[in-house]
């Protein structure tokens, strides 16, 4: 598998508890390189667009509220097989089901406030990266 990029968000529950550095350490120890990173406060429009695939889900309103409640850190991660590697580094969506040593097991508060986002496919990674970064922002 070639070097790949994935898109990551360190979510509000984590930035609020000053966990950006701790999460970045887990990312780097997991073999991924942070090749772009910016701290932003997401607008409602940005969050609604980003999570558009979930717009019919019962938790959509709560999810948009949460993602706009405090700053987030948007990132591009690079490495071998980065999309699935980062899913492994994050752990299961529900922290109660996440494996030991994963970001969500270590830090997540709940299934909603689960500290990190990672793309679920290479195609979505490219779309998500382009929502927040231009190619010139990414330094590999
Ligand atoms: P993400 O897309 O954030 O990386 P994921 O791919 O593991 O997470 P998804 O099914 O795509 O999970 O859900 C997106 C996000 O919506 C979850 O990370 C979580 O914050 C929130 N979410 C998912 N299921 C629930 C739920 N049952 N109740 C509340 N929030 C939820
Ligand atoms: Mg997802």
Image (cartoon, rainbow, N blue to C red):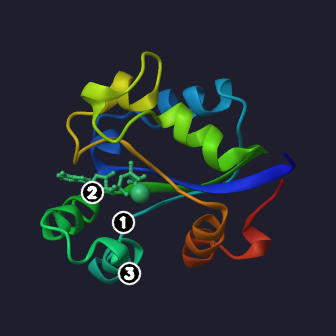
Residue that badge 1 annotates: 41
Q: Residue at x 22, y 33 (%)?
A: 109
Quarter of the image for residue 89 reads: top right
Q: Is the distance from the Cβ of mark 3 to the nearest ligand 1 atom less than 8 Å?
A: no
Proximity of marks 1 and 2: CB atoms separated by less than 8 Å: yes
Q: Nearer the viewer, mark 2 or mark 3?
A: 3
Give the alpha-carbon distance from disc 2 to disc 3, as whole Å. Answer: 17 Å
Q: Which residue is mark 2?
A: 70
Q: Earlier in the sequence, mark 2 or mark 3?
A: 3
Residue behind mark 3: 49
119 is higher (above) or lower (below) than 108: below
Q: Secondary structure at mark 3?
A: helix
The vertical placement of 42 against 46, above or below, is above
- Rendered location of residue 104, percent (x, y): 37, 32
The Cα atoms of the two marked residues, 1 and 2, are separated by: 6 Å
Q: Nearer the viewer, residue 90 or 92?
A: 92
Residue shown at the point (28%, 61%) measured from the top left: 67
Left or right of 99 in this view: 80: right
């Amino acid at each position: 598998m070639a070097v790949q990029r994935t898109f990551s968000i360190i979510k509000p529950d984590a930035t609020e508890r000053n966990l950006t550095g701790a999460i970045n350490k887990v990312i780097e120890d997991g073999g991924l390189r942070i090749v772009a990173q910016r701290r932003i406060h997401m607008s409602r429009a940005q969050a609604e667009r980003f999570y558009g695939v979930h717009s019919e889900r019962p938790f959509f309103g709560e999810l948009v509220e949460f993602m706009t409640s405090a700053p987030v850190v948007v990132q591009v991660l690079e490495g071998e097989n980065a999309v699935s590697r980062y899913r492994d580094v994050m752990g299961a969506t529900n922290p109660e089901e996440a494996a030991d040593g994963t970001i969500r097991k270590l830090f997540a508060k709940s299934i909603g406030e689960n500290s990190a986002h990672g793309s679920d496919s290479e195609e979505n990674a490219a779309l998500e990266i382009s929502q927040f970064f231009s190619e010139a922002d990414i330094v590999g």
